[in-house]
Amino acid sequence: MTFIRSISGFRGTIGGPEQDNLTPPDIVRAAQGYGSWILAGRKAAQNGKRPCIVMGRDARPSGEMVDRLVSGTLMGMGIDVIDLGLSTTPTVEMAVVGENADGGIILTASHNPVQWNALKLLDSQGAFISAEAGAEVIRLSSVPHSFAPVEDLGQVTRHDGWIDAHIQAVLDLELVDRDAIANAGFKLAVDAVNSTGGIAVPALLKALGVEEVTSESQSILTWTGWPLCPKTAACLARSIPLWPSQITF
């Protein structure tokens, strides 16, 4: 089992002894470190507003647990949380800027197997934090913290519209000619590996007028493991002669 602290965030395997894995105490300490970095770098409160963090996650089975631990810790530090729920990495990055937030956290271990999860940390520009900031977050995650009094606790707000906003931003790009794409009659076979691509990709393709061929692994949003496996590959292979497609993902 593994727990890795790096300038890009905190990642590890769920379960097992703390400090050697991404256990609840380790998740809380990681959130404390990041929250302290946000508080230390923030200027005097603007119009009485609390600091605000945007969060989104992938569909790993541990995602909801990690989300609640991180959200609760940030609330306890007096930081508001805008929770996007199931979302994509670039959508969270966009939302940080769009919500005028102080930072963002993406709960995803990307390509790692299902037992992994991670906290990937963003700055106020929606970019991954710098090496210097990452080192400071790691340091702050291992020192005692002061928490907010009850009247200053943060709040969690759910915002569900950011994937749609992201798609609209794509459509609004000067180089994206929606009519030309739709008139081309493209067919696209997609395996979204039971994660948030199963929300964003079909909606994007529909908005672009592209006919989508859906694989079996797109129907249930519970990520179960490495995306490339015989079952999903065979599913996509079967789709090609049934629904001829120009591109397969």
Image (cartoon, rainbow, N blue to C red):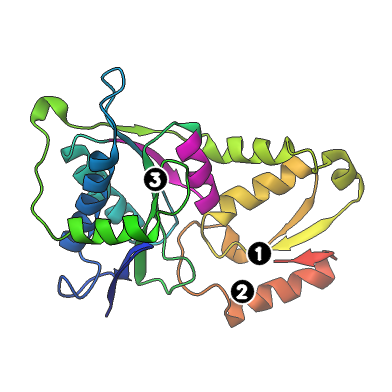
Judged left or right of residue 16, residue 49 is right
The residue under label 1 is 215
Q: Quadrant of residue 165?
A: top right
Q: Position of residue 140 (x, y in %)?
A: 19, 55
Furthest toward the front, the residue is 132
Which of pointers 1 and 2 lies earlier in the amino acid sequence? 1
Q: Nearer the viewer, residue 116 or 32?
A: 32
Depicted 14 relative to depicted 83: above or below:
below
Q: Secondary structure at mark 1?
A: loop
Depicted 222 relative to depicted 206: above or below:
below
Q: Answer yes or no: is residue 197 visible.
A: yes
Q: Amino acid at mark 3?
A: Gly
The residue under label 2 is 232
Q: Position of residue 87 (x, y in %)?
A: 49, 48
Q: Amino acid at mark 2?
A: Thr
Q: Residues within 10 Å of mark 3 (few under 14, many from 20)?
A: many
The residue under label 3 is 104
Residue drawn at the location 60% of the way across and 37% of the way down: 164
Q: Nearer the viewer, residue 24 or 195?
A: 24
Q: Which residues are magenta?
A: 80-97
Q: Position of residue 221 (x, y in %)?
A: 49, 56
